Image: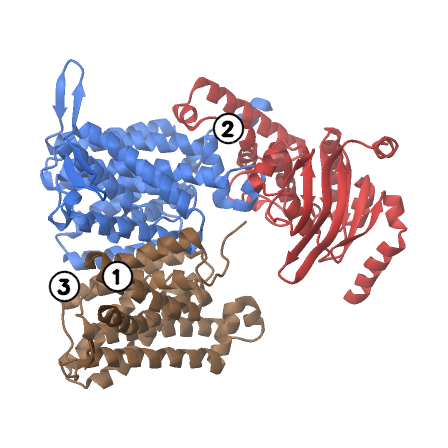
Chain colours: A brown, B red, C blue
């Protein structure tokens, strides 16, 4: 019982960051119809910015976090402007392959600059965990959950309560009509990609200190993000949040009760199961032809 | 002349659409539709925009499953059959917009269209057995013949996507004919064609019918519909408001009302 | 004309070991050749049916593991007290099993994943490869997990009256790979020019129209997946018996990406595309090795993929044939002219 309780607490902590990852990816797909293979790299990037700012520049952990989100935003905007904007109107496969190329180049660049050795980010939190009865959770993880929750709420407000958000939603519905209504679709695309990227960077910045920071850390994160997005339905933000927590739960239970080796397999199992039994995700958005 | 013959002695029913309804969520695209097409007959389905004509087409060819009612072809109920299985019965359609394989030549388009006649085992075709070679040669002759038949002989080696709108429609018909139809469903075949192209097309439709192929036509071009149809079925707001030979439809008050009503709205 | 071109190309490739004795280069050519076979199989799906499979390495890896395990033998326990003990068979039997099992996997994956298209298809294929990788990593009793399967015997063929021929040297393996590659090329060429190939092209260009003229989507795509997976499994088998050691890293996503780059750069939907793209990108690391660190090579790899997509989105071979009208006429499917002339 207490074991299960511990798994549920871990699920909450993990699920929050997974949701962040998923929202970013699903926004980009929903609005731009781009399958973003650089998402994992942005996650890695966020974690490395954390490491550099805290470890190398000796700045405060809580200052580094917003810096890392901002850096993710800028890098996302840069990728969109240089790689995606010239390809507007190309088919989805072409943009997907370009994103794969960007992912390889960027990941190799990270490896080149920082080497393959894992780095750890020092945190200001006490080492002793918070224990309530049989359940214990580190202060760092509690902070990660709180920060992730705050960022999710912030994203919701941005999308549902601001002018930019309503323009994004209009573009999501139908970009031609949105353009006719005076929405600057180019700007919306760049903002969307930057926002999605900054969320991935935020997830990396939050989880990097929990685990360790290394160049390939984003690969699994990207695959997990895909699983989350498939679960929630491509382009569905609420679905991504729910999907994030479902994946976290499946991983916790899979690792706890089956074998820790299959923890990372849960995401793929979910993807395959969803596509067999409910091909358009739990909250569908049609894409099939015919 | 053949229209008269049909009136005197009704042909056997080929296609029968019986009390079909189609709802999309709360939206009623077709409320209650019943009509039939006889063997060798040309029937047109007309009506203002949004009357449910293309929906009816999609139901008949299995791209949509009706909410209620039955469609049968030569006595066989089509419910639950996939489009490809319906095509195997000889019920072949063309499309309003997507009517060709754009990156292939006209000749290759028709070769793809001949798929139903060219089916042989994978192994024999990979091995290039003599009988497969003979079949392939026969298919090439057939393709060339079909291209001449629709009058595109000079365009055979051009990419289908580079052809004019009207020519692409002809490719669409050649493709459909390649699939050996016993009945052809044409969705707005002459839209975007000029007068002379339309005239050629009408000749083609008649030629096709004279091969014994029944035709169901959805079309906006009224003079074309009036000249070519044996019978006309008029749809408005998802229900049939009139049915009969062109002369009767021309003077039907309900039809005039439906079209005038729309005309006024557009003006 | 095209026949002459093909024979010249094969003769050129066959003559390579006569004037090139550097074992490092020969090794690079052999592994490149194996990957070219994989890329050709991927091209069958990506270039001729339009389905971007990003899990293609799974079939390669399955072929490698099946071939290795068939020729090494294994002894595993399954649930419910079942034990399977397999005595070693010949490497050739391993090759055949690799093709069959990979093709079967292609069938299963095809049946499941062709229910979806576009982004969903891509993601489900990636997931399949990753699940297979994790099984290879964790099912230690069968696969040795990260410790790898070692001492895989070299490929050998029993020749009637001549005894057993063992492909021991690099030279032997070079001609083995070349032979299998030529056979696979011919198989794919025959397939895409048959009525099945026309059905595939129809589905790729306009699925709705293809269905309306009686083309069976699932059957056609599944067939393509089966053939493609089988060929990729053959490549995996060659790899296992050449390298002689297989670990779960063979399933790495980057290997799929390598094949995708070969196909896209060379020209998807062109028969020669994966060969040209494969030779360029397979040998690029050899050319770059003296001047660049390995990480920098990968950066160049990624950048090259982007640049090619920007300036030659259709790939090198189609771009070349477009620039050279004479070549283009050669490459035109031969039947598209004859039929008309015969009937005229």
Q: Is residue A185 above or below residue C105?
A: below
- Indicate the chain on which mark 2 is placed: B
Real-space CA distance between mark 3 and mark 2, rounded to the nearest whole angstrom? 55 Å
> From this viewpoint, is residue B130 visible?
yes
x and y percentages locating residue A130 in the rendered image: 19, 82
Q: Is residue A178 above or below residue B177?
A: below
> Splitting the image into 4 quarters, where does residue C14 fall?
top left
Nearer-the-camera pick, A1 or A60: A1
x and y percentages locating residue A235 in the rendered image: 44, 65
CA neighbours of label 2 inside 10 A, class few (<14), some (14 to 19), many (20+): some
Q: Is the residue under label 2 in contact with that under label 1 (CB below 8 Å)?
A: no
> Splitting the image into 4 quarters, where does residue A269 fall?
bottom left
Q: Is residue A248 above or below residue B223?
A: below
Q: Secondary structure at mark 2?
A: loop
Nearer-the-camera pick, C188 or A10: A10
Residue C34 placement, left or right of C332: left
Q: Secondary structure at mark 3?
A: loop
In the picture, the disc for residue A116 is 3
Nearer-the-camera pick, A263 or A36: A263
x and y percentages locating residue A8 in the rendered image: 28, 71
CA neighbours of label 3 inside 10 A, class few (<14), some (14 to 19), many (20+): few
Which residue is label 2 attached to?
B119
> Splitting the image into 4 quarters, where does residue B93 fall?
top right
Q: Nearer the viewer, mark 3 or mark 2?
A: 2
- Indicate the chain on which mark 1 is placed: A
Residue C53 placement, left or right of B256: left
x and y percentages locating residue A70 in the rendered image: 31, 79
Q: Is residue B259 above or below residue C258?
A: below
Q: Are marks 1 and 3 on the same chain?
A: yes
In the picture, the disc for residue A219 is 1
CA neighbours of label 1 inside 10 A, class few (<14), some (14 to 19), many (20+): many
């Amino acid at each position: 019982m207490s074991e299960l309780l511990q798994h549920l607490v871990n699920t909450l902590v993990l699920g929050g960051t997974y949701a962040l990852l998923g929202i970013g990816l699903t926004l980009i797909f929903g609005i731009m119809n781009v399958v973003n293979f650089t998402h994992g790299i942005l996650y890695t990037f966020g974690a490395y910015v954390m490491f550099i700012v805290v470890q190398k520049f000796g700045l405060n952990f809580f200052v580094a976090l917003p810096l890392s989100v901002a850096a993710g935003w800028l890098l996302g905007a840069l990728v969109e402007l240089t790689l995606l904007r010239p390809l507007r109107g190309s088919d989805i496969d072409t943009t997907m392959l370009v994103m794969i190329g960007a992912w390889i180049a960027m990941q190799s660049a990270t490896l080149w600059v920082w080497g393959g050795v894992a780095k750890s980010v020092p945190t200001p939190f006490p080492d002793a965990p918070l224990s309530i009865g049989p359940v214990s959770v580190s202060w760092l993880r509690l902070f990660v959950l709180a920060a992730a929750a705050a960022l999710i709420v912030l994203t919701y407000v941005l999308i549902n309560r601001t002018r930019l958000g309503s323009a994004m939603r209009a573009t999501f519905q139908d970009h031609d009509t949105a353009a006719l209504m005076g929405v600057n679709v180019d700007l919306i695309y760049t903002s969307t990609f930057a926002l999605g990227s900054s969320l991935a960077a935020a997830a990396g910045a939050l989880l990097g200190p929990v685990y360790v920071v290394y160049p390939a850390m984003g690969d699994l994160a990207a695959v997990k993000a895909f699983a989350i997005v498939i679960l929630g339905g491509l382009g569905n933000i609420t679905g991504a949040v729910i999907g994030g927590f479902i994946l976290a739960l499946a991983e916790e239970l899979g690792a706890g009760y089956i074998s820790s080796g299959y923890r990372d397999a849960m995401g793929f199992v979910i993807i395959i199961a969803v596509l067999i039994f409910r091909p358009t995700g739990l909250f569908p958005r049609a894409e099939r032809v015919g | 002349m053949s229209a008269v013959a049909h009136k005197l002695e009704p042909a056997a029913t080929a296609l029968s659409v019986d009390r079909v309804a189609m709802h999309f969520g709360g939206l009623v695209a077709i409320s209650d539709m019943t009509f039939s097409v006889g063997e060798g007959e040309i029937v047109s389905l007309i009506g203002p925009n949004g009357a449910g004509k293309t929906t009816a087409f999609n139901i008949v060819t299995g791209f949509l499953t009706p909410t209620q009612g039955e469609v049968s072809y030569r006595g066989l109920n089509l419910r639950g059959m996939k489009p490809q299985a319906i095509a195997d019965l000889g019920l072949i359609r063309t499309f309003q917009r997507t009517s060709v394989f754009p990156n292939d030549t006209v000749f290759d388009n028709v070769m793809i269209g001949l798929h139903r006649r060219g089916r042989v085992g994978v192994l024999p075709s990979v091995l290039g057995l003599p009988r497969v070679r003979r079949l392939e040669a026969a298919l090439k002759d057939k393709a060339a013949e079909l291209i001449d038949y629709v009058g595109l002989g000079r365009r055979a080696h051009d990419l289908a996507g580079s052809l004019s709108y009207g020519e692409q429609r002809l490719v669409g018909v050649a493709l459909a004919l390649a699939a050996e139809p016993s009945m052809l469903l044409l969705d707005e075949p002459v839209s975007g064609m000029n007068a002379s192209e339309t005239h050629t097309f009408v000749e083609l439709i008649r030629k096709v019918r004279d091969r014994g192929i029944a035709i169901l036509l959805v079309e906006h071009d009224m003079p074309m519909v009036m000249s070519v149809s044996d019978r006309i079925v008029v749809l408005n707001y998802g229900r049939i408001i009139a049915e009969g030979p062109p002369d009767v439809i021309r003077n039907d008050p309900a039809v005039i009302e439906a079209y005038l009503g729309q005309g006024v709205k557009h003006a | 004309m095209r026949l002459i071109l093909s024979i010249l190309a094969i003769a050129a490739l066959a003559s390579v070991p006569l004037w090139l004795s550097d074992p490092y280069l020969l090794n690079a050519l052999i592994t490149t050749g194996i990957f070219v076979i994989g890329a050709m199989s991927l091209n069958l799906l990506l270039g001729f049916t339009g389905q971007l499979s990003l899990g293609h390495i799974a079939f390669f890896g399955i072929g490698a593991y099946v071939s290795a395990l068939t020729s090494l033998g294994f002894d595993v326990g399954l649930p419910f007290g079942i034990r399977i003990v397999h005595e070693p068979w010949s490497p050739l039997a391993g090759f055949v099993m690799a093709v069959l099992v990979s093709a079967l996997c292609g069938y299963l994956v095809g049946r499941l994943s062709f229910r979806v298209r576009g982004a969903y298809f891509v993601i489900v294929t990636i997931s399949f490869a990753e699940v297979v990788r994790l099984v290879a990593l964790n099912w230690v009793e069968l696969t040795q997990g990260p410790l790898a399967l070692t001492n895989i015997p070299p490929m050998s063929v029993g020749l009637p009256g001549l005894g057993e021929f063992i492909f021991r040297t690099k030279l032997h393996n070079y001609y083995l790979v070349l032979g299998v590659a030529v056979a696979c090329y011919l198989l794919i060429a025959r397939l895409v020019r048959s009525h099945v190939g026309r059905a595939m092209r129809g589905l790729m260009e306009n699925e709705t129209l293809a269905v309306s003229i009686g083309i069976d989507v699932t059957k056609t795509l599944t067939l393509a997946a089966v053939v493609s997976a089988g060929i990729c499994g053959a490549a995996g088998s060659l790899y296992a018996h050449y390298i002689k050691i297989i670990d779960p890293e063979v399933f790495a996503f980057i290997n799929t990406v390598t094949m995708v780059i070969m196909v896209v750069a060379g020209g998807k939907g062109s028969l020669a595309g994966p060969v040209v793209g494969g030779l360029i990108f397979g040998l690029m690391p050899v050319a770059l090795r003296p001047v660049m660190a390995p990480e920098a090579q990968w950066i160049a790899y990624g950048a090259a993929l982007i640049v090619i997509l920007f300036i030659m989105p259709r790939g090198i071979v189609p771009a070349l044939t477009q620039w050279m009208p004479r070549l283009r006429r050669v490459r035109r499917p031969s039947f598209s002219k004859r039929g008309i002339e015969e009937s005229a």
